[in-house]
Image (cartoon, grey):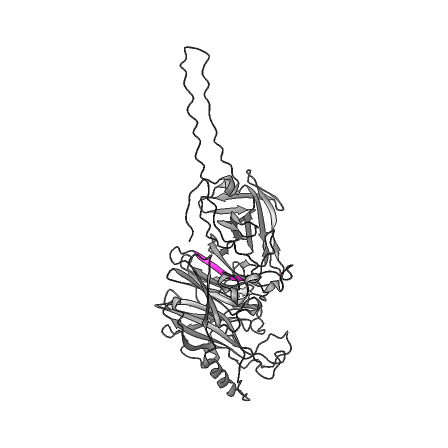
Amino acid sequence: MKKSISILKTVSYFGIFLVALASTSCSSDDPATPVTPDPPVVVPPVVVIPDFPGPTYADNYTSIASWGSRSQWNLANVHDPSVEKSGEYYYMYQTDASYGNAHEGNGHFFYRRSKDLINWEFMGSSMTQAPAWVKDSLNNKRARMSPALPPITNPNYGYWAPCVRKVGNKFRMYYSIVVTNPIVGTDTNTSWSERAFIGLAETDDLASNNWVDKGMVVCSEPDGVKSYVRNGGNDWDAYFKFNAIDPSFIETPEGEQYLIYGSWHSGIAALKLNPTTGKPDKLKTIDDYGVRIAGRGNVGSNRWQALEGPEIIYNPDTQYYYLFLAYDELSVAYNTRVARSKNILGPYLTSSGSSITTGAECFPMLTHPYSFKNHTGWVGFSHCGIFQNPTTKQWYYASQARLPEGVPGINASNAVMMGHVRGIQWTEDGWPVVESERYAGVPTTTITEANFIGTWEQITMNYQYKTIQKAVTIYLTADKKVSGDATGTWSYDSAKKILTVNGVKCNVSDAWDWELATRKVTLGYSGLTASGLPVWGKKVN
C-alpha cells in the first residue's frame, strides 16, 4: 500500500531546483527619512528525501533458477498468476512452469505470498498429484466414444492456470489439468490431444494449504461438428467446442456465480454455477457447457481463435464487467486486451463499440512486447490476474513477462519468466490502463506541473506481431511544448492527475525506474490513444 507524503522535491529526487529569492529595500538619501532595516531573509527548509529502498532483484534470475535456490526466487519463475488476499498476505498461484523445468517432481500449482506485493516468499506446491477422478473421467468418456477407445493407462498431464477466489467463508481454487496424449495413435500432428479438465478444490484458510478436492467442474467436450483427426501441426480447427482451461471465477453483485474459461477452441465461455457447490447443475448436452462471450474472427466456421486466459472483474465505480484476454502465442507475441459489458453474458464491447462476443478484434490493448532504453525489454507479456487491495480498493494487474529471444549471455533467454505486478489506473471514460513501471511501493507525492519539465522516454505501442515496441526520447519544456522524437504540446490537470501529451490523456503515477542499473524513483504515465493503443512514459532526467 502506498503511503502519502506531501513534500518539496529536491534535486536528488526529480531534478527540480527550489530557489529562494531574497528581496532588498533601498533607503532614501534624505537623512530625514527614517531607515527601515531590511527584513531577514527566510530560506524555506529543504526536505531531503531519504533513499527509497526499492526492489533490487535482478530480471535475469538464471543464477538462482534451480529448485535448490527457490527461497531466493521472489517473482522469478511466475506464469499465469492468480492473486488473492487472506489475512495480512497476498497469495499468488500459478501454472507449473519454471526456467529449466526446475519445478518438475516437486508438486503442482506452486504458490508464494507477500505482504507488500514486492517481496514474495516461495511456498511450494498446493497439489501433490492429479486427483484420481481425472483419469477415471477420461477413460469413462473414451469408453463411450463411437467407436469406443481403449483406456489410457498412464496419462500425461499438464497443470495449468489456477484461479483462486474467496467465496463466502471459503477459498476456492479452480484449476486446469490437461491430458496431453493424442486421442488416437501417438502423433499429435494427426490426432488432437485428449481433453482438458477444470476441477475445484476448497480450503478455509490459504495459510494452511489444506485443499480439499471437490472433483470435476467441466471438461473439453466434442459437439459432433469436427473429427478428432488433425491435418498437420498448423490445423487448429479443433475437435472440442470449448477448451476447458484457464478458469476464472466471478460472483455478480446479485449473487450469481460464473466460471469463465476457454482457449483457442471456439472462444471464451461463461458457465453458470450453483453457488452452493461451485459447479454447474448439469452437463448433459453441449449447451450445458456454457455460452460464448468472446471470440476472434469468424467464430462460426473457424475454431482457431488465438485468444485465451480470460479474467473477468466487476468494477462498481463504473458498473461494468471487464473481460481481460491474452492474445496470440505466448512465448513472444502475447499481449493483453480488454472489453466491457453491462451484462455478465455480454455483449462485450470494444472502445469503438464493436462486439468481441461476435468476433470483433478486441481493443483497448493494455500490454504488448516493449522496451524502454538501456534494457532488453519484455515479451510474452499477458495472461493476467486482476485483483484488488480490499482496504484501499486499488486494482492491480499481475502476469508473467519473458525476456526476449537471443539475449546475449543467457541460454534460452525467452524461458526467463518474471512475474510483473503493476497498478491499474482508470481513464475518465472508464477504461483500465496498466502502469508503465512495475509496482514497487513508491511513496505517493504531490505532483505539480514543474515536475514534468525534463527528459522522458515514451512508447506508443502499435500492435505488431512478435515485434518489440521501443521507446523514443521526448522533452517536455516549461513553455508546454513537446520536442525530440515527437513534437507537440502538453498540459497537466493536477486535480485529476492527468497529463495530456499530444492529445493523449495519461494517468500519472510515482514510479520506480526498473531499467536503470541503479534503480531510482521517477514519474510514469500511462494512457490510451483514440484507437485503444497504450502509451507509456517514464521520466529519465
* Residue 388 among those drawn in magenta: no
Count of picture labels: 0
Q: In the picture provided, is 242 more to the left or to the right than 253?
A: right
- Coordinates of residue 31 in the picture (x, y in percent): 43, 10
- Coordinates of residue 318 in the picture (x, y in percent): 42, 57
Extreme left residue here?
169
Observer able to see residue 12? yes
Between 31 and 322, which is closer to the camera in this rendering?
31
User: Which corner quadrant holds the C terminus?
Assistant: top right
Observer able to see residue 355? no
Residue at x 52% of width, y 56% of height? 57
Residue at x 57% of width, y 61% of height? 63
Magenta stretch in the rendered image? 391-404
Residue at x 59% of width, y 73% of height? 302
Residue 217 to residue 388: above or below: below
Residue 267 to residue 221: above or below: above
Between 168 and 45, which is closer to the camera in this rendering?
45
- Coordinates of residue 231 in the picture (x, y in percent): 64, 78
Between 1 and 346, which is closer to the camera in this rendering?
1
Extreme front residue here?
68
Q: In the picture provided, is 538 more to the left or to the right than 406?
A: left
- Coordinates of residue 524 in the picture (x, y in percent): 52, 49
Between 255 and 43, which is closer to the camera in this rendering?
43
